[in-house]
């Protein structure tokens, strides 16, 4: 597509070019006897999703790293607390937190805290079904991370390790998990 939507940054502001809202040919909706009841109105919309302070997390996934944050404020009662999902500010003292690399910790200590197996994720269903959504706990981390298991059947307490998409999409699906004993990464992912 020649007129594909493009977004870049100049002097701290988004600049845009191309088509962000494209109408496509509609079709009639008819009853079996031919009576016209309505039309479809297909539209292609390009949504700009700003990552703001969370951008390092998604850049990290593209580089095969799992980044979290840690409170390093000496005045904070809970100094040292580590968070993933990535939080920018400490929920206790509201200070800006430090980015910490949790890849090694995840490889060594990640366990399934809970899980759900489903065939629907909502719009676009971009994951292969059945989808094994898992809640993950890491040693020494205050929060639970939600992701999905690509290889193996989930069990509560099961040790797992992260895999990363070879061709990053810069979204959360660049991160997936396999059971800890997996030697070969699934297609399209690396360990
Ligand atoms: Zn704090």
Image (cartoon, rainbow, N blue to C red):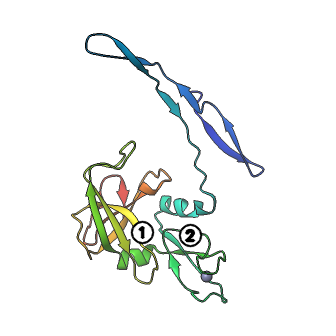
Q: Is mark 2 within 8 Å of ligand 1?
A: no
Name the disc covering residue 170, or none: none
Q: Residue at x 54, y 76 (%)?
A: 100
Calculate the distance from the C-alpha at mark 1 to the C-alpha at mark 2.
Answer: 12 Å
- The crowd level at tag 1 (other Cα within 10 Å; few <14, some 14-19, many 20+) is some
Extreme residue toward the right, this view: 11
Q: Is residue 17 above or below residue 33?
A: below
Front-most of 49 and 109? Answer: 49
Q: Position of residue 148 (x, y in %)?
A: 34, 60
Tell me the element at label 1.
strand
Quadrant in the picture for residue 132: bottom left
Q: In the picture provided, is 52 more to the left or to the right than 123?
A: right
Asked whether, in this view, residue 49 is left or right of residue 24, the answer is right
Place of residue 55 in the rendered image (x, y in percent of width and height, measured from the top left): 59, 60
What residue would you read off at disc 2? 87
Q: Nearer the viewer, residue 173 or 164?
A: 173
- Label total for image: 2
Q: Name the image quarter holding the C terminus.
A: bottom left
Q: Are marks 1 and 2 in contact (CB under 8 Å)?
A: no
- Look at 64% across and 42% down and name the residue there: 7
Residue 160: image quadrant is bottom left
Q: Is residue 161 visible?
A: yes
> 38 above or below 65?
above
Q: Quadrant of ligand 1?
A: bottom right
Answer yes or no: is residue 1 visible: no
Disc number for residue 145? 1
| Label whose residue precedes the other's in the sequence (1 or 2) | 2
| Badge 1 residue CB within 8 Å of ligand 1 | no
The secondary element bearing badge 2 is classed as loop
Image coordinates of residue 130 in percent, x first then y, are: 25, 52
């Amino acid at each position: 597509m020649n007129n594909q939507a493009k977004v870049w940054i100049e002097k701290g502001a988004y600049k845009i070019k191309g088509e962000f809202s494209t109408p496509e040919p509609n079709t009639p909706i008819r009853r079996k006897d031919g009576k016209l009841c309505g039309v479809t109105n297909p539209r292609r919309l390009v949504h700009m999703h700003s990552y703001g302070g969370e951008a390092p997390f998604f850049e990290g996934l593209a580089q095969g790293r799992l980044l979290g944050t840690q409170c390093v404020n000496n005045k904070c009662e809970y100094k040292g607390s580590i968070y993933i999902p990535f939080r920018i500010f400490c929920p206790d003292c509201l200070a800006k937190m430090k980015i910490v690399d949790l890849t090694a910790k995840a490889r060594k200590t990640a366990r399934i805290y809970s899980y759900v197996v489903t065939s629907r994720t909502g719009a676009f269903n971009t994951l292969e079904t059945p989808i094994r959504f898992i809640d993950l706990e890491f040693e020494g981390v205050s929060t639970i991370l939600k992701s999905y298991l690509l290889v193996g059947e989930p069990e509560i307490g099961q040790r797992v390790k992260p895999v990363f998409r070879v061709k990053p999409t810069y979204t959360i699906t660049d991160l997936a998990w396999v059971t800890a004993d997996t030697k070969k990464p699934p297609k399209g992912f690396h360990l």
